[in-house]
Amino acid sequence: MKTSKSHPSFTGSLTSVDLQNHVLVSYFWMRIGSGILGVTLPFVLWIGGRISGICRQDSISAYFWATTADGTFLRTWFVGALFAVSVILGFYRGFSKVEDILLDAAAVLGVGVTLFPMPWPPDHLPWCKSVLADLSTHPGITFFGGRVPLHDVCAVSFFICTAFICWFCADDTLTLIKQPWLRSLYKRIYRFIAIAMPGSAIVALWISWIKTDGHDIFWVETFGVVAFGVYWLVKGIELRMSAADDLAVRGKLRLVEGQIQHVAGEGS
């Protein structure tokens, strides 16, 4: 009886260790990708706008509308980056159920930032500076006697969710870092970012409320967006150093009272 010949596989071969590393690295690049998008987005919009003939807008969100006289716009860059980050956050799984819930909420709110763009007068062609719009014609909620657009609600809530992740969840894996000084450094960075993200969004919203002739909050928003990106870059480096993903996949970690611990008898 003839046996069938084995044919070379198009996909090649990998050892069990190589295959495990090949799969795990996707989590690393999800974090790094989110970080790169966050750090670069404001500058891509600013520089891209300058190249296209669009002056720096008063806010990052204004690039949804910013258009040149010949119809050039950067909306696709703005929307594309936010959707990409939101998809990553939605599919990414953290090290606790609480972190998963916050990530999912941030993903939904990130999409909301694009689905509910900042208010803008329909007859305004903003290739240079933005102007104030009639908020009564845009989706929003009433807050302290004023109307807050849903765009602002989603943006601030997005940063609050990610700040909660930084403050309450980021520390969970620091137990895997052996050097005390390095654990302390990571914790300080996460605490700073947890304050910087929602703080910048609230300051930007406050400036937009108190000024009646337009407002320039681009750099305030940039600070918060870059802080978001820095968090994911730093978190990616931390988890890569501690091999947390690898240990979790091999069943060597567990979550106990908000702290990631080695499973007893499964290595150090």
Image (tube, rainbow, N blue to C red):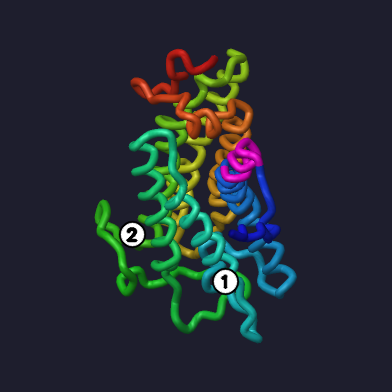
At numbered mark 2, what does the secondary structure look like: helix, strand or loop?
strand
75 relative to 70, above or below: above
Tell me if I can see residue 45 in this picture: yes
How far from the left and from the top, in percent, is residue 244? 54, 29
218 relative to 177, above or below: below
Task: Check the picture and name the quadrant holding the N terminus.
Answer: bottom right
How far from the left and from the top, in percent, is residue 36? 63, 50
Between marks 1 and 2, how big is the CA–CA gap?
Answer: 25 Å
At numbered mark 1, what does the secondary structure look like: helix, strand or loop?
helix
Q: Which residue was labeled with disc 2?
A: 148
Q: Nearer the viewer, residue 93 or 59?
A: 93
Among the two numbered marks 1 and 2 on one chain, the one whose residue lies closer to the N terminus: 1
Q: Residue at x 58, y 13 (%)?
A: 180
Q: Residue at x 65, y 53 (%)?
A: 40
Which label belongs to residue 76? 1
Residue 149 image-quadrant placement = bottom left
Q: Nearer the viewer, residue 38 or 212?
A: 38
Query: Between tags 1 and 2, which lies in front?
Result: 1
